[in-house]
Amino acid sequence: MQTEGPEYETLFALGPLPYIDNLQTIVEANDLANRLGMDTISTGNVIAFAMYFLVITMCILS
């Protein structure tokens, strides 16, 4: 895959914020979001929120 690479805000939003530590996965998520015309920072924030909400819900239900 040939790309310029994600911006540093995107690296944070799609990386440590949702606890993703694989750089290749972050680059692929960035590429996919760009192809779909999605804002990568907002996308990362929504993914992180959904993951956090899922963990909290699982903790409450268990």
Image: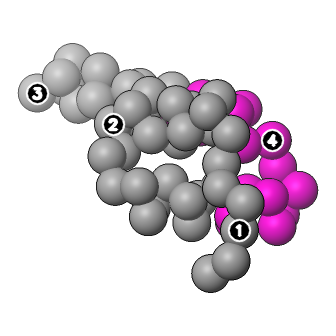
Residue depicted at x 52% and y 31%: 12
Please name the residue that numbered disc 1 is placed on: 3
Residue depicted at x 68% and y 39%: 7
Disc 4 and disc 2 in contact, CB within 8 angstroms: no
Separation (CA) of disc 4 from disc 2: 19 Å
What amino acid type is highlighted by mark number 2? Tyr
Q: Foreground mark, 3 or 2? A: 2
Q: Is residue 45 magenta?
A: yes
Residue 20 lies in quadrant = top left
Q: Nearer the viewer, residue 31 or 18?
A: 31
Give SS at disc 4: loop
Q: Nearer the viewer, residue 46 or 35?
A: 35
Q: How many marks?
A: 4
Residue 40 lies in quadrant = top right
* Residue 61 x, y percent position in the rendering: 19, 26
Disc 3 and disc 2 in contact, CB within 8 angstroms: no
Q: Residues within 10 Å of mark 1 (few under 14, many from 20)?
A: few
**Which region of the structure is painted magenta?**
31-48
Please name the residue that numbered disc 2 is placed on: 19
Separation (CA) of disc 4 from disc 1: 17 Å
Give SS at disc 3: loop
Separation (CA) of disc 3 from disc 2: 22 Å
Q: Earlier in the sequence, mark 4 or mark 3?
A: 4
Give SS at disc 2: loop
State whether the magenta stretch is mostly helix, strand or loop: helix
Please name the residue that numbered disc 4 is placed on: 39
Residue 50 visible: no
Left or right, 43 with reference to 29: right
What amino acid type is highlighted by mark number 3? Ser
Please name the residue that numbered disc 3 is placed on: 62
* Residue 62 x, y percent position in the rendering: 11, 27
